[in-house]
Amino acid sequence: MMQPPFPVRPFTTGDAAALGITRKRLRLAVDQGLVRRVFTGAFVRADVPDSTELRAQAAALVMSEHSVLCDRTAAWIHGIDVLRYAELDVIPPLETYVLRGHDPTDRHNCQGGTRDLLPEDWQEIGGVRVTTPLRTALDLACKLPRRQAMAALDAFAHEHGVSVAELRRLLVRYFRRRGVVQARELVPLTDGRIESARESWVNLEIHDRGLPAPEPQYWVLVDGVPTYRVDFAYPHARVIVEYDGEEFHSKPEKKAADEKRREWLRRNGWRVIVVTKENFDDGPTPSWIIELRGYLGV
């Protein structure tokens, strides 16, 4: 007897049961990589491409009709990943808040409470309410630890065009909210040219040490042609700061290309500082900050 196929759209265990798909078969399909779990209780076939709409459709299956997806879940829906590494191997709970006048959800896989949101604070994606990129960015600026909050702001500026001016206008409504002091400090530092979370960390560390702000994503010219793009540069001092992430820069071919590029830069008068994740815990004053301070003469 031919077994019923898994739906193309996101589905729940109840939807699967209605189609004659047992829990045992569903668990086996997940273990075999034929089906992926989007949220706790929400699944989709593994061959269905990921998208903002698909994530929202999956969320709609397991949340209250009066809820709005907020914070880190909203960021994930918008394509901004702010989950901690320890959470990547598990399915995190939905972070949802209900509009004032409705009872918060008591589902075990949902977190949140009640939050005052204006209609302009959320949008509908795939049939579910999600806080806008602007609102989500500012909520995370208040809620996340400092480095992660800075990375979230830069990511929303880079991916969704959220501007410092827009953030400042919305920030007025956050008077006395927990975390607003942090948000007020970080919003002016937001820069959409920064392309990764750890680059945001580098830029924030430079700011915190009282050093001049570098130029992000700077193009070095070769014979007048933009040839080498670097993470950060001080053009007048001819100093470059780059972050090497192990997931990308550890590849042999990429590592060789980096070394060749940096060798050319050094031969042509640039001083290059390379930062890795280990450097963020390099004593009270990281060694690369001491090196940068010396190069800049400040």
Image (cartoon, rainbow, N blue to C red):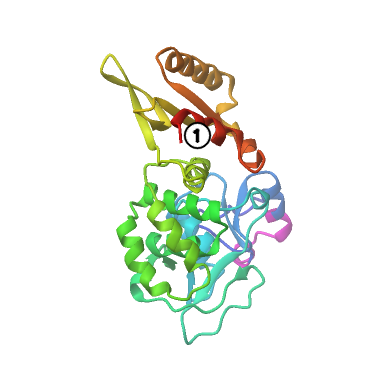
Identify residue type, mark 1. Arg
For the point 42% across and 29% down, the residue is 230
Check disc 1 and report its element: helix, strand or loop. Answer: helix
* Residue 188 found in image quarter: bottom left
Residue 41, percent across and down? 63, 63
Residue 135, percent across and down? 40, 65
When the figure is inspected, residue 84 is found, relative to residue 115, above or below; the finding is above
Residue 258, percent across and down? 50, 20
For the point 47% across and 28% down, the residue is 295
Q: Please give the range of residues in magenta.
A: 14-26
Q: Main secondary structure of the magenta part?
A: helix
For the point 59% across and 19% down, the residue is 252
Of residue 156 and residue 56, the one placed in the foreground of this image is 156
Of residue 251 and residue 31, the one placed in the foreground of this image is 251
When the figure is inspected, residue 110 is found, relative to residue 83, above or below; the finding is below
Of residue 229 and residue 111, the one placed in the foreground of this image is 229
* Residue 134 found in image quarter: bottom left
The crowding category of the residue bearing disc 1, from other C-alpha atoms within 10 Å (few below 14, some 14 to 19, many at least 20), is some
Looking at the image, the residue that sits furthest to the bottom is: 101
Q: Is residue 41 left or right of residue 129?
A: right
For the point 48% across and 77% down, the residue is 115
Q: Which residue is mark 1?
A: 293
When the figure is inspected, residue 129 is found, relative to residue 193, above or below; the finding is below
